[in-house]
Image: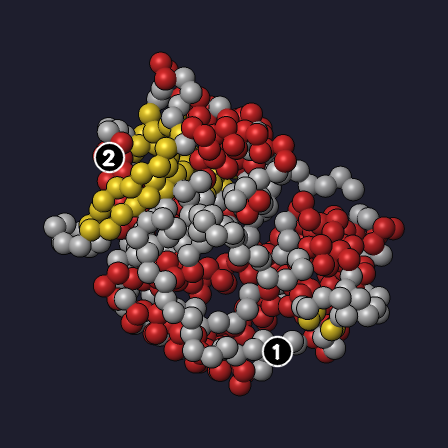
Amino acid sequence: MIRTLAVTDGQRRKFRALLGRMECGTVSVPLDYRKPRGRQITIAITRVKAVDRKRRLGSLALNPGGPGASGYLFPLQIASMDQANARLNERYDLIGFDPRGVGYSTKADCPAPQGQGVPPEPGPLPKETAKLIHDSGVAANKACGDFDPAFLGQLTTLNSARDLDRVRIALGERKLSYLGISWGTWLGAVYRSTFPGSVGRMFLDSVAPVNFRLDDFEDGHAAGTERHFARMAAWIAKRDGTYGLGSTVKQVRATVLALGRAYDETPRHYSDWEMVADGATVAILAIQSAPDWPQVAQAFKEMREESDTAPPALKKLLGQGALQRPPAGAPERFNATAGQAVFCNEDPSRLGFSDAWATYERRLKRNPITGRASRFSAQCAGWPLPVQKIKVRRGGGSLVLAGHRYEAVSLYEWTKQMHAAIGGTIYTVADDVHGSVMRVPDCAAEAVSYFNTGRIDRGCDGTAVPAK
């Protein structure tokens, strides 16, 4: 189990000690809060009690993101990272939970779609193939939504926020503090808006957009990566003697564009790697964050040479193939049905093929370096359940919004938009790494200090840009 959670050798002893202190339980909640006496479901929770019981400040719920991700063991993962994170558990009970639809909580798994779908084709996507992909996705979405509409229709962020407040009550807490990352920031914002009197201190890292639409999310991600590619190109240009990709940002950009076109014209099939490299592969490399820039630059360099075997740097970055399934008995890490249901129950776009194709073509034109990194899909088209929009508002306890200045998954401007909508303090992280605060000791120490004192500085450096 520990291997599946990416726990390092240096963290194992601490992780095992925390596991020995962890308590498990469930909380019963209504499936439909409009029918509080109707069908009940269970929310699985864990607790690691505060070490310093005399100076205990309360309970701190943790969510790693999603939707669809398990947070059951997240307290152990957070507290075992380093000494700064371990201090989070000194004065707080750390609370993990599986949101409804995930892991040990009540869930429903849609059957696998009939057939194998539309096999991917290397190179630029033809419109005819895109239509097949869209039609296949629409059919799969409809089949999933129709599988158990009574349950799947109740998988929303608002209901997860309501569940979280039931967890607070079950723990006997007057107020609940909260740390959320990625989608967990949206859950936190909704919880604070819905139960303003129940929030203690809240820290949200890599903040979600205020108004959620999947097509806007993809457009924002593509634009952000295209914009921030200039930082990568500048770093590579300073090392032209090592990589030979150009000595200016303009030259590096031209080299990468040409590389993408060449791989689209002639996709590469390698004797030692099951993946086929094309222009999308080049785009995926171009969106990597700063810690991976040396490997990305090396991969670009190697990809310019003809070879029957895959470039080593490319294999190292993009992996050897599909992820291994966790061993039997290990907690579920992600539930795809829950992820799709939460997204689609809240996404008002649900584009038909003509609009989806026009959006995709516009994205490629506007973002020639990184646009191909986002694959064409039906997204939520065909989802048969009604859209349930959620609006956040000001109110509640202390709040910190951590935005990463150069990030492209959660754009920095989304942090500002969320701040305008719900208030709080903006904490600026000067890196491009999604949800990195608790993984960088200096930043994590400030987050822990905030939970202990209610005060925080205006930002931290975040993950360092490689020197070489």
Residue drawn at x 35%, y 37% as measured from the top left: 24
Quadrant for residue 188, please give it. top left
Under mark 2, the amino acid is Ala
Compared with residue 447, is residue 7 higher up or lower down, i.e. above or below? below
Q: In the figure, is residue 464 to the left or right of 341?
A: right
On residue 121, the disc is 1
Q: Quadrant of the C terminus?
A: top right
Left or right, 38 with reference to 89: left
Q: Where residue 250 sits: x, y (%)?
A: 75, 59
Who's the residue at 54% across and 41% down the image?
2
Mark 1: few/some/many CA within 10 Å (<14, 14-19, 20+): few
Q: Can see residue 405?
A: no
| Residue ranking furthest to the right | 241
Q: Residue 126's x, y, as percent?
A: 58, 82
Return the x and y of residue 448 as percentages of the image width and height.
47, 27
Seen as rendered, the residue at the extreme front is 328
Which circle's residue, 2 or 1, is located before the other in the chain?
1
Q: Residue at x 59, y 62 (%)?
A: 322
